[in-house]
Amino acid sequence: MSKNIVFMGTPEYAARILEELIQTGFNILTVITQQDKAVGRKQILTQSAVKTLALKHNLKVLTPKSLKDEIFQELLRKLDIDFIVVAAYGKILPKSILELAPCINLHASLLPKYRGASPIQSAILNGDEKSGVCTMLMDEGLDTGAILQSLECDIKDKNALLVFEELGKLAAKLCVKTLNEFQSLHPQIQDESKASFCTKIKKEDGLIDIKEQTARDIYQQYLAFYNWPQIFLNNGLKLIEIELVSEDEKHQGAQILSLEKDAFLLACKNGVLRIKKLQEAGKKVLDARTYLNGKRLKSGDYLY
């Protein structure tokens, strides 16, 4: 018999999970997502990836301003819910919703590591070689519930866009597996001594200082903030495409070491980066050599 699901989620990662639930025949009673938000310089009102998908499949969509809204909660109480599935919704669920049905969260880390809002970026930033997704039986804490099942994958030297995509696919499969096997599962209490936390990414997290940071640290920032906010210098210059060349060479930080066809090698505090594309604030993306030519910079000069 098809299980009745209320789905709560917002970004593309969550949309991938919802798509899998639809394709595998679960009965989606309603979809709850964040309200449309003004995006970009032109502040264009944009709906979430989950809302776009739900409307495409003619599903009922709710976008409550507050999960504690009495009319909203009354609507949920009237539904015959088997499970509430939550994936990157963006707000903590109140006890009144947690009590309606088992609430299963698809968290993009191997809990208790990286509880909070940015598990994927945090794992990349810290240079972890492995990450994964887990299904968790939600409680009132922030990602503190008992673990149901998990899957892991390799994230070494992968950017956030690729990792989001891979973990979205894994989470989609894991969600279906957990729902189908729920009655036979034995939830495992998290080990609090191993817990770590991550916060919401801010624009200033993308700021780098080539003279004071190692090439490896900057490269991990580049991978972690590949989608947003990207990485940039104090003067607003963004490094759009870079590669890690070496981690140990010692030079003067920010010195241009050598020129290549469309790129240049740049010294950091420790190590060397290959700079392939850059973008000045308010200007278009340029290949690295075009940028240097425009600034009349050559090998031996300093980027700033």
Image (tube, grey):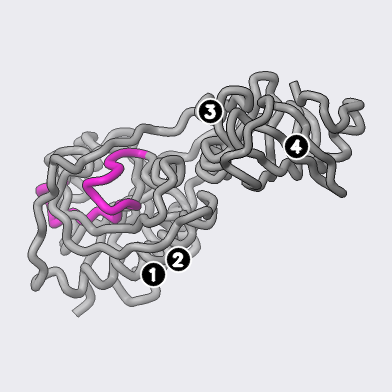
**Which residue occupies the foreground of this view, 66 or 41?**
41
Query: Mark 4–mark 3 contact, CB under 8 Å?
Result: no
Q: Nearer the viewer, mark 3 or mark 2?
A: 3
**Crowd tier of the residue under label 1, counting other residues whose Cα lies within 10 Å: few below 14, some 14–19, many 20 or above:** some
**Crowd tier of the residue under label 3, counting other residues whose Cα lies within 10 Å: few below 14, some 14–19, many 20 or above:** few
Q: Which residue is mark 2?
A: 57
**Which residue occupies the foreground of this view, 52 or 77?**
52
Q: Secondary structure at mark 1?
A: helix
Image position of 264 (left or right of 212)? right
The boundaries of the magenta stretch are 98-117
Q: Earlier in the sequence, mark 2 or mark 1?
A: 1
Q: Which residue is mark 3?
A: 203
Q: Which residue is mark 4?
A: 278
CA separation, marks 4 and 2?
Answer: 40 Å
CA separation, marks 2 and 1?
Answer: 12 Å
The type of residue carrying mark 2 is: His
**Which residue occupies the foreground of this view, 27 or 133?**
133
Q: Earlier in the sequence, mark 4 or mark 2?
A: 2
Q: Nearer the viewer, mark 3 or mark 1?
A: 3
Give the x, y percent position of residue 99: 10, 48
